[in-house]
């Protein structure tokens, strides 16, 4: 079995060497300006979400990961001039913790994410990965931090140090 750290290091190096793209945002008189490798650019893109029953994110569900649909969608986005996608990592297996009892990510899920990123890079599309919730198997990290005073509900995702630490570990 391949060590996950080695796989991710090789993947990161591969993306870095092939793309060498750094996106930064600067503020110019109250307007956000994006730079790609220090050249002003305009981001044009969309959210990319595969849904099951019109409500459940399933883009990276191992049994549903549709290679052919992704390839065609990326090609079409490229043809429309898109250069940026916000990609949701949320899915039922992520929310349930991948059936794992401790922090970690299954190789099949990771391979799907890597496949998508490589395909997007082929079409010169930058990808912003986002996840609304931490996987359930990261709850031990969340619980290792005190609950902040006067913070409840959905605000816990942002203002709870444990949530931030779990998100950092996940990403």
Image (spheres, grey):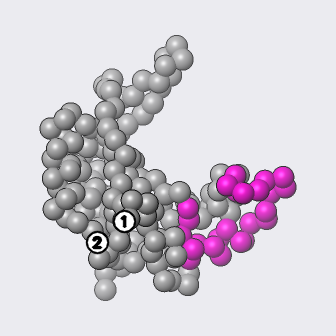
Q: Would you place residue 72 above or below residue 96 in this image? A: above
Q: Which residue is mark 1?
A: 52
Q: Which residue is mark 2?
A: 64
Quadrant of residue 146 in the image?
Answer: bottom right
Side of 160 where 119 appears, left or right: left
Q: Identify the element where label 1 is drawn.
A: strand
The answer to whether residue 71 of the structure is visible from this angle is yes
Q: Which residues are magenta?
A: 133-156
How many other residues sit within 10 Å of disc 1, few (<14), some (14-19) or many (≥20)?
few
**Rendered location of residue 88, percent (x, y):** 41, 56
The correct choice, above or below, for 112 with respect to 45 in the image is below
Residue 83 horizontal side relative to residue 4, left or right? left
Q: Nearer the viewer, residue 140 or 91?
A: 91
The disc at residue 130 is: none
Q: Are the two marked residues, 1 and 2, in contact with CB atoms closer than 8 angstroms?
A: yes
Relative to 105, say whether 75 is above or below.
above
x and y, in percent, of residue 33 in the image = 42, 24
Q: Few, some or many C-alpha atoms within 10 Å of disc 2 (few <14, some 14-19, many ≥20)? A: few
Residue sitting at x 72%, y 57%: 153
The foreground one among 61 and 113 is 61
């Amino acid at each position: 079995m391949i060590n996950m750290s080695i796989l991710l290091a090789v993947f990161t190096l591969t993306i870095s060497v092939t793309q060498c793209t750094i996106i930064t945002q600067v503020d110019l008189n109250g307007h956000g300006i994006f730079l790609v490798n220090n050249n002003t650019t305009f981001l044009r893109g969309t959210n990319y979400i595969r849904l099951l029953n019109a409500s459940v994110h399933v883009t990276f569900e191992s049994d549903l990961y549709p290679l052919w649909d992704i390839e065609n969608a990326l090609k079409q986005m490229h043809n429309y001039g898109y250069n940026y996608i916000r990609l949701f990592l949320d899915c039922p297996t992520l929310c349930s913790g991948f059936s794992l009892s401790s922090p970690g990510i299954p190789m099949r899920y990771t391979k799907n994410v890597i496949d998508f990123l490589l395909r997007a890079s082929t079409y010169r599309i930058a990808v912003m990965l986002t996840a609304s919730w931490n996987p359930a198997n990261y709850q031990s990290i969340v619980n290792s931090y005190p609950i902040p005073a006067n913070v409840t509900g959905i605000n816990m995702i942002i203002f709870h140090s444990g949530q931030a630490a779990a998100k950092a570990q996940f990403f």
